[in-house]
Image (cartoon, grey):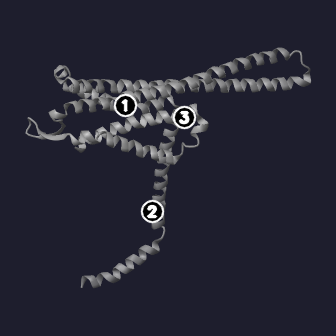
């Protein structure tokens, strides 16, 4: 049972976590003032507990329907087998699983990330408009540079320097926002590509098993499972390549681990050095041993 139940729970936890992250990002970007009041550490702990409870409750029927059946190799294995009286209930439960673990999460993530992308795109257009206005303002300053007296030319040059600096900051901000939009689109696309084959074939097998029995081989089924579970490590890779802050945080964790190992190694060397630099302790131990040893021999 554990062999079947634990992967099912992990799938539910992974799915609900992705949905929760998408909603957290939506409120943090689209409604930042309202979200600051409740996006706390205690709120994160509550979300984690709720995710695990929902995942455990969702897959309880899978654990209850497990039965030990004999195999051709004279071994036994647990399989999800529903009785014939519960055939309609099995189909309904399978459809509910597909809706809760695939259709609804995909819709929620697409909607949340779509709203985030729209908000970021509006900000990009606004910043580009500001950039255009500042460029025109800079041209006016450069044109008026020949008309102003010498005492005011330094102020004009200073203002043009501020404009060019702000122009560079706006360009970096626009590039970062475009990169975030691409990353959000990739997250939704990866989830769709990784999980669609498995859920489609699984639902097909439950609804009409005989029509698909000879069309999907064991190798194809294993490849679909591998593709579905690969989403667990594809998302971090996407964040690493498309999110600069994620890369910095990832590297900082490695630096902390390396520094801790160096510090622990340095402490070990210092302790060894202290032990070798204090011969009095070794002399006392040798004296005690030489005094006690003859009595032990007798």
* Nearer the camera: disc 2 or disc 3: 3
Spatial distance from mark 2 to mark 3, Cα to Cα? Answer: 54 Å
Q: In what quadrant of the picture does the N terminus appear?
A: top left
Residue 187 seen in render: no
Q: Relative to 153, is 107 on the left or the right?
A: left
Which of the numbered marks, if any, corresponds to residue 211?
none
In terms of depth relative to the viewer, which is nearer, 47 or 240? 47
**Is tag 3's residue or tag 1's residue first in the polypeptide sequence?**
3
Element type where label 3 sits in the image: helix
The count of marks equals: 3
Badge number at residue 272: 2
Seen in the picture, residue 45 relative to 125 is either above or below; the reply is below
Measuring from the top left, give residue 247's x and y in whole percent: 50, 35
Circle 3 residues within 10 Å: few <14, some 14–19, many ≥20:
some
Image quadrant where residue 36 sits: top right
Is residue 237 among what the camera can see? Answer: yes
Sequence order check, earlier mark of 2 and 3: 3
Question: Residue 7 at x, y = what percent?
Answer: 29, 39
Q: CA distance from mark 1 to mark 2?
A: 48 Å
Q: Are marks 2 and 3 in contact (CB under 8 Å)?
A: no
| Tag 3 residue | 27
The residue tagged 1 is 231
Instruction: State the image coordinates of residue 129 (x, y, percent, origin top left).
Output: 68, 18
Q: Quadrant of residue 285?
A: bottom left
């Amino acid at each position: 049972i554990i062999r079947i139940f634990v992967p099912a729970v992990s799938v539910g936890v992974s799915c609900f976590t992705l949905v929760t992250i998408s909603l957290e990002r939506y409120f943090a970007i689209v409604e930042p003032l309202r979200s600051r009041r409740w996006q706390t550490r205690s709120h994160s702990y509550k979300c984690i507990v709720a995710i695990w409870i929902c995942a455990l409750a969702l897959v309880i029927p899978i654990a209850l329907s497990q039965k030990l059946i004999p195999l051709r190799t004279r071994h036994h294995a647990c399989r999800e087998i529903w009785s014939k009286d519960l055939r309609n209930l099995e189909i309904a439960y399978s459809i509910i699983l597909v809706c809760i673990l695939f259709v609804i999460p995909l819709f929620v993530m697409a909607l949340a990330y779509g709203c985030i992308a729209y908000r970021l795109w509006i900000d990009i257009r606004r910043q580009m408009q500001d950039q255009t206005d500042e460029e025109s303002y800079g041209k006016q300053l450069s044109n008026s540079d020949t008309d102003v007296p010498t005492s005011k030319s330094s102020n004009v040059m200073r203002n043009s320097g501020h404009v060019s600096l702000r122009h560079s900051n706006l360009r970096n901000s626009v590039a970062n926002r475009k990169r975030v939009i691409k990353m959000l689109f990739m997250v939704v696309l990866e989830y769709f590509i990784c999980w669609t084959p498995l859920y489609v074939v699984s639902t097909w097998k439950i609804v009409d098993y005989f029509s698909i029995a000879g069309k999907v081989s064991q190798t194809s089924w294993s490849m679909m499972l591998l593709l579905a579970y690969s989403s667990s490590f594809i998302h971090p890779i996407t964040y690493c390549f498309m999110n600069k802050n994620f890369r910095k945080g990832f590297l900082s964790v490695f630096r902390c681990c390396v520094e801790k190992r160096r510090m622990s190694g340095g402490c070990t060397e210092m302790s060894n050095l202290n032990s070798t630099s204090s011969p009095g302790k070794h002399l006392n131990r040798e004296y005690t041993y030489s005094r006690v040893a003859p009595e032990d021999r007798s």
